[in-house]
Amino acid sequence: MPEAVCDNSHSRQVKESTVQTEVLSSHPHHLPLGCDLLFLPRSLSLFLSLTVFFDDCAGNEGLAFEVSHPDFQVDEEMNLVARRDVMDSGTVMFIHGVNEQADDMAQVDIVGAPPRSPQTLRIQPYRSKRALFAPRMHVNENMEPPFPKVIGTVMSPGMENDHIFHMTGSGADQDPKGVFTINRVTGEVSVSQELDREAISSYTLEVSVTDLSGKLVEGPVALLVDVNDQNDNRPIFKETRYAGEVLEGSPTGTVVMTMTAEDADDPRLQNAVLRYNIVRQSPDKPSPNMFYINPESGNIVTVISPTLLDRETLPTTQYELEIVAQDMKGRDVGLTGTATATITITDKNDHAPEFTHSLFQANVDEGSTGVAVNLTVDDRDDPATGAWRAIYSIINGDPTQNFEIQTNPDNNEGMLSVVKPLDYESVVFHTLLIKVENEDPLVPDVGYGSSSTATVHITVLDVNEGPVFFPDPLQVTKMENIPLGSFVALLNATDPDVLQSQSIRFAVLRDPANWLSVNPVRGTVNTSANLDRESPYVHDNKYTAIFMATDNGSRPASGTGTLVIHLEDYNDNAPYVHPSVVRVCEDTKDSVVIVGGRDRDIHPNAGPFKIELGKQPGLEKTWKVSRVNNTHAQIMLLQSMKRANYQLPLVVTDSGLPPLSNSTEIKVQVCTCKKNRMDCSSAGSYTVSLVLLSLFCEY
């Protein structure tokens, strides 16, 4: 058996070689380990227990072994022993030894049939028949130069001198090319460069034997090369900073968040087995160990008691934890990765809002509206949550709903406002009871104290108010054209300031037609001009004027009132005829025209109208006027007349009491009519269709 070596240079050389050893003795065999935890030999064929020799040149303190095969273990006496009968021939396992000074690994091959009993030794004889044999090979990643390095030998018993070995596949003649080479004569397989298990963890090659002419003699057979892992990758967190939160008052053991890292090394080995630890908490008050991280799962849980986990009493609402993930199950030789966790203590509504004062006072001018007083409260909860935002309500003292209260979102103050003007003469003092609560309900077992309600005293200040007209508007009915100075109305205005002795004077504020005057003391309104229903200032038979009443307070106040006069019609407008120009044909006896009566007055001082010829003699021989309806009459030409313009006198009379008549003239144009065309050019008129003559009516 090779022996452990403590010379560092020789240790490095032996460490990076592979030795094939066959056990043929029934006694326990030894697996020595040299400096830097050197395993010698690097590969064994095992039929029974072996004793592992270990020497790190520093006393072997804190030595620990791990065996990759679950059926084997290294006992306290450093014997590699089987836990049960070994049934799997051809299996490869690894022994991993580690302490504070060194870290190394050895390979063990299990060959042969399972033993008949724990004491039975079965020896694997060499096959007598020639057969190409390519044992599974292993090579450590990150090996240092020089290269190439032999990692194993392909065997072909009975091989002739004229036979040569060939190797093909990925890593040989395929990408990545040239990683492995084979000695064409001896069958030694070598690695030609440093390997990275995290890039390629194993290679599958094929080996064959040919004669010198290239004729295949044996094979091809598969050659498997495994890349042994070294702990060359640190644990890496996906993020450098993590954020989590926990509700204040949460029970001890509440999971806050989970932090996990990844390690690119072989997950079957301790190289990628991570353990987590909190190495720093900032701030460290009220306890330096407020949180705990499960070393295996990465779950961060609370350790502090619910009573101390009080957001309002903690020195800060955010704690920063530095988390370290370490491979090799957290042993000191393991590589580490670091990340930061920021944990926010979130708020729950465990503090009721409290008024800063039990009594608030304010003075409000009567007749005004707007904010009267701002109510202030204290709340220890988080201002960014509904546990802090206040809702105010008036629970007593406002039966007529003159007040309302809203929350100022910037400072949480309650803005008590007057929304209906207050009257000093009715109520001088108002006492309101205000309640405050949060948007979010309080947590159980937290009650409101007396400071969650407050009293507000509102004092109404007397203000000189302007006189008030009643009724407003004042409506009266008058006949138009009543005599000048006639009484129209009596204005009625009162001063709301009943506790003050004040007089009122009246004045005209707006009188569009200047028809009215008012007595400044008594408030009587009289006509100063004729009331004309037909005036453009009258709309829908109504005339509107505005008056002002002013008191004699120290600061005089005024009010306005409206007077609406409904005007009745008087028959003061004579009717007239429309249109004033008509046309007839010169030789057509049955030519007729239609005229109508119009009147600026209204019923009953307008139609029905009576339209007749004037009193000039002889008119009845040429013209005839006959009634069509209550408003229109037709004029007929009784004999042919020369083309010319004629003035026809007419008399129109309305139906008023007494009726009014109007003597007027209309122009009749006598025109030449041929082939449905009317020629009035000599009379200064224009041509229209004869058909229109029978349809002529009021414009």
Image: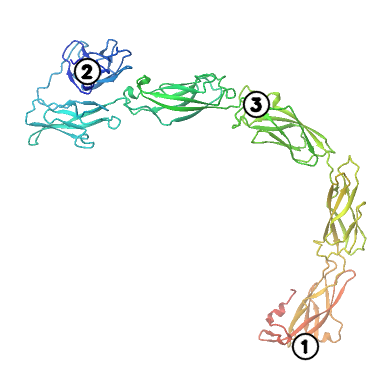
SS under mark 2: loop
| Few, some or many residues within 10 Å of mark 2 (<14, 14–19, 20+) | many
Q: Is residue 88 visible?
A: no
Report how far apart the C-alphas of labels 2 and 1 lie in the structure.
Answer: 155 Å
- The first of marks 3 and 2 along the sequence is 2
Displayed quadrant of residue 359: top right
Q: Which residue is mark 1?
A: 639
**Position in image of residue 369 (x %, y %):** 76, 41
Judge depth for marks 3 and 1 and give the one in front. 3
- Give the residue type that dot 3 points to: Ala
Is residue 96 positioned above or below 595 on the image? Answer: above
In-front residue for pair 493/112:
493
Q: Quadrant of the C terminus?
A: bottom right
Figure quadrant of residue 365: top right
Mark 2: which amino acid?
Answer: Leu
Classify residue 192 by image quadrant.
top left
Using the image, tell me which numbered label, if any, was put on residue 40: 2
Position of 357 compared to 223: left or right? right
* Discs 3/2, front: 2
Q: Is residue 154 above or below residue 114?
A: below
Of residue 365 and residue 680, the one placed in the foreground of this image is: 365
